[in-house]
Image (cartoon, rainbow, N blue to C red):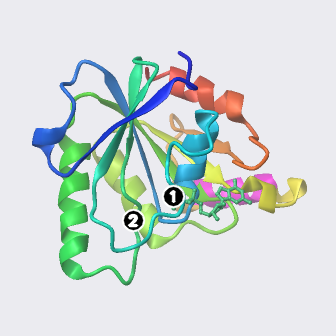
Amino acid sequence: INPNNIEFMYSAMDPSQYPDGNMKEIALSGRSNVGKSSFINAVCGRKDIARTSSKPGKTATLNFYDVDSQFIFVDVPGYGYARQSKTSREKWGQLIESYLAEREELQAVVQLVDLRHKPTQDDILMYDFLKHLEIPVILICTKSDKIAKSKVQKHLKVVRETLEVEPEDIIIDFSAVDKKNLPKVYEALSNYV
Ligand code: GDP
């Protein structure tokens, strides 16, 4: 698989718009601003494939990216906007929940959390939901460049303990700035595609 060979396919607002379904899918989920777009761009060696810092209040869509015609990245809209209206939060919930719960092509979810901070209630809810559905999770702890090297293990421990990360799930400290652990990310993804 050549992750540099990535192409935006389309956005979907409901299941009738999902791709045909002969490729495996890996979804990416995380709080807004966690570094999800930066992660996708880093993995794919591009600067611009995923828009960074999309603004709150945007219509919730699932964005599908073809990766070397080998698998599909599904960018799930960021969760955790306190200011989001109730209706748009409900729409978000329905779209994501039905995708995660029902999509047979889904192999694993990359859940991103900010390594600097203790995972939030939203992070915990999302992780619990994924585990309830028995979906394998690759936990990416972002912005590791912002933490002193000597403190990374301590922060990873906080993430592991707060989310009660299951032993079979992979957890990786990552930085889109210095591309820390990018080979580990590829290795983790290759388990599922
Ligand atoms: P998204 O909303 O989850 O897609 O987050 P973005 O990728 O747009 O990132 C949000 C902000 O965090 C931007 O200002 C990024 O430049 C910054 N950011 C993302 N990843 C990293 C990282 O690994 N290190 C640092 N220092 N900043 C990052």
Q: Position of residue 135 (x, y in %)?
A: 35, 38
Q: What residue type is disc 1 on?
A: Leu
Q: In the image shown, does 38 or 114 lie closer to the viewer?
A: 38
Q: Quadrant of residue 23?
A: top left
State the residue in front, 20 or 118.
20
Residue interval drawn in magenta: 152-161
Per the image, the residue denoted by label 1 is 163
- Residue receiving disc 2: 79
Location of residue 79 in the rendering, given as x and y in whole percent from the top left corner: 39, 65
Q: Residue at x 42, y 68 (%)?
A: 122
| 115 relative to 84 in the view: left or right | right
9 up-or-down from 95: above or below: above
Q: Residues within 10 Å of mark 1 (few under 14, many from 20)?
A: some
Residue that sits furthest to the left in the current view: 16
Ligand 1 occupies quarter: bottom right
Neighbours of disc 2 within 10 Å: few (<14), some (14-19), many (20+): many
User: x and y percent of residue 35 in the render?
Assistant: 58, 56
Mark 1 vs mark 2, foreground winner is 2
Instruction: Determine if the magenta segment contains residue 96.
Output: no
Q: Is residue 187 left or right of residue 131?
A: right
